Image: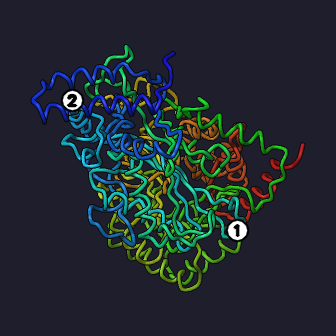
Amino acid sequence: MRRKQHPIIINITIIFLIAPMIASRSCGVSCNLLGEAAARLSRAPSVRGRAIIQTEGTSDITSIRRAVNRGQATSVGPPGFHRGSRAFFGSQSSSISRNPTFLSLPIMQQLRGGGDSERNSLSSTRHNSTLATTESDSTADHRPSWRRAYLAVGSNLGDRYQNIANALSSLEANHAGSIRVLRTSYLRETAPMYVTDQPAFLNGAVEIETTYTPLELLRAMKRAEGDLGRDVGPNSMAVRNGPRPIDLDIIMFDGYEVSNPDGSAADTLGDNEVIPCALVMQTEKLEIPHPRMSEREFVLSPMNDLERATESGRITHPISNKTMNELLHSLFHQNSNSTTSEDEQAYRVLPLPRGRMLQFNRTIIMGILNVTPDSFSDGGKYSSSVELAASQALQLVQDGADIIDIGGESTRPGADEVAVPEELERVIPVIERIRQESDIPISIDTRHAAVAREAIKAGADIVNDVSGGMHDPDMLSSVAEMSVPMIVMHMRGTPKTMQSLTNYSSADNRSKDGIGSEEGGVVPVVATELMQRSNAAEAAGIPRWLQVVDPGIGFAKDIDGNLSLLNGADRLRRSCDNLPFLWGPSRKGFIGKIAGESHPEERDYGTVAACLASIHSNDWGKDDACNMLRVHNAKAVRQAILVYEAIQNAKR
């Protein structure tokens, strides 16, 4: 193991670089002296396994800052990491959008046939990275490399979600070409730490790519915080760890080695071995990794979300050498003997328009309101009158529904498609009428982007697309532009053809381009295809923290397929990165076949059993599982869930 590189050695080697330059300018000494200086620099010891920038005194701060600005801590992305050309949060304008547009995620460029060419071009155009001695040298003419960094984001004042979204929009818009958001965690509502007499926080984590050095990124983040009203000036009077509209912190950063493994000089960044999340850095202004991340659940839980989504399944702390999951387990173990009140627990949430939140501290009940004349479950009972439909919605709320799902097109097996104008005529007046009486969250059950847009304008909050964005090519981009949550369901074909597409054997589950699951069986295949749709939504600009997935019970599934999905709920969650799940078994045909009940309205007892099976979990992380149930009889299911969850939470 090589010894740690000492700041004194860095300063001495910099002198070796300066002296030949001065001599060559004054007396024409050969530039070969620069090569000798570089060789001396290459023999300076380095640390393998992590990239270190460390200061051991105030006198070294300036030189360390200059070293950071020279690019010593930069790295290239790991092989296979796909980059895109468009921002995720916001547009390219410099102003902060009130409602930012989520555009394309770079990680999914492969789905559209891009990414590799840009990555190869980036690799082939890397230039030499040099140590310099003046601030002006930091602008040397070379193309900077993209590196990954992980940011913690939080807010506890105003519209918390919008503050976070605006901050990320600001970073991308004001630093176009230098910062781009790759992926988000899920969001959690958490009790304040350190200063407890303040509102609850909304917290998450974000994976980004940047060409900036850590200190440059820090300056960009401080500017974004200031633009959103946080007092971040040198004479700030804000209370440390007190209330703030936005909080951005660098958690981890990719690193690389200055020296090659054999100790020779590294002429290009391409000669250095990239070590993800390896940077260890300590200056007066910034410390990486974040020194208090291991004591903060509101950091570790979102980082664990991001870790699940990585190809390797690991994001490793460069000092403790523990993964995010291991650090989170250690924290839970440390806190296992402490008493945590319900108000102090962290809960995942789904942000809604107008600053509202759906909190997953319990199972969410979605009440079904079909305003179609050919509904399979109620025979079109609520399609003839807006008042009758709105009254039923309010009754569902009284019975325990947390969301009202309004649909104007039947998607029962064999159903014909409904024209957009007719669908709009059915659903918009009902949404508007409900909004006159209640602010209950509303989802619009539609496959059409035009219907989704008009419904959101009328007061709906969530788009629920049974086709997962496949029916209408404008759906994903429309939802991204509106910045609202989307429920992405698994389905094959159309309602007219789906029941002929229930074969999930290994020979039939791969598409012509080779995309699909290698493993046969409905659970792994549905998980793979569902994640393809989730990733497509993410690529279109719908971040993970605005997504819910639905395995599509009864859609392109036979009776055995439906039962296998319900029995494999835990596996589905794990395979889908623990995304929130919506289950919709209510009154479906498979219940009637098992129970011998031909009338859908008489299948509520079987529906309760299916709902309980869908939320049952044997996983250690069941407390972090997020479940929603789409049902017709909200009262019966709510009562069953209350009893079931009370039993599950009882002391043993």
Give the secondary structure at mark 1: loop
* Mark whose residue sits in front, 1 or 2: 2
* Residue 646 placement, left or right of 145: right
Residue placed furthest toward the front = 27
Q: Percent from the top left, x then y, of residue 195?
A: 70, 64
Q: Which residue is mark 1?
A: 400
Q: Residue at x 36, y 34 (%)?
A: 75
Viewer-side residue, 442 vs 356 = 356
Query: Which of disc 2 and disc 1 is earlier in sequence?
Result: 2
Q: Give the spatial CA distance, label 1 vs label 2.
A: 78 Å
Q: Percent from the top left, x then y, of residue 114?
A: 24, 39
Q: Residues within 10 Å of mark 1 (few under 14, many from 20)?
A: some
* Residue 245 placement, left or right of 645: left
Q: Percent from the top left, x then y, of residue 426?
A: 43, 75
Number of numbered discs visible in the structure rendering: 2
Q: Residue at x 65, y 71 (%)?
A: 396
Answer yes or no: is residue 131 visible. Answer: yes
Residue 20 shows which numbered tag?
2
Residue 209, compared with residue 453, is above or below; it is: above
Q: Amino acid at mark 1?
A: Gly
**What is the quadrant of the C terminus in the image?**
top right
Residue 552, compared with residue 424, is above or below; it is: above
Answer yes or no: is residue 111 visible. Answer: no
- Please identify the quarter of the rendering in which residue 120 is found: top left
Q: Amino acid at mark 2?
A: Pro
* Residue 637 placement, left or right of 349: right
Q: Percent from the top left, x then y, of residue 315?
A: 52, 34
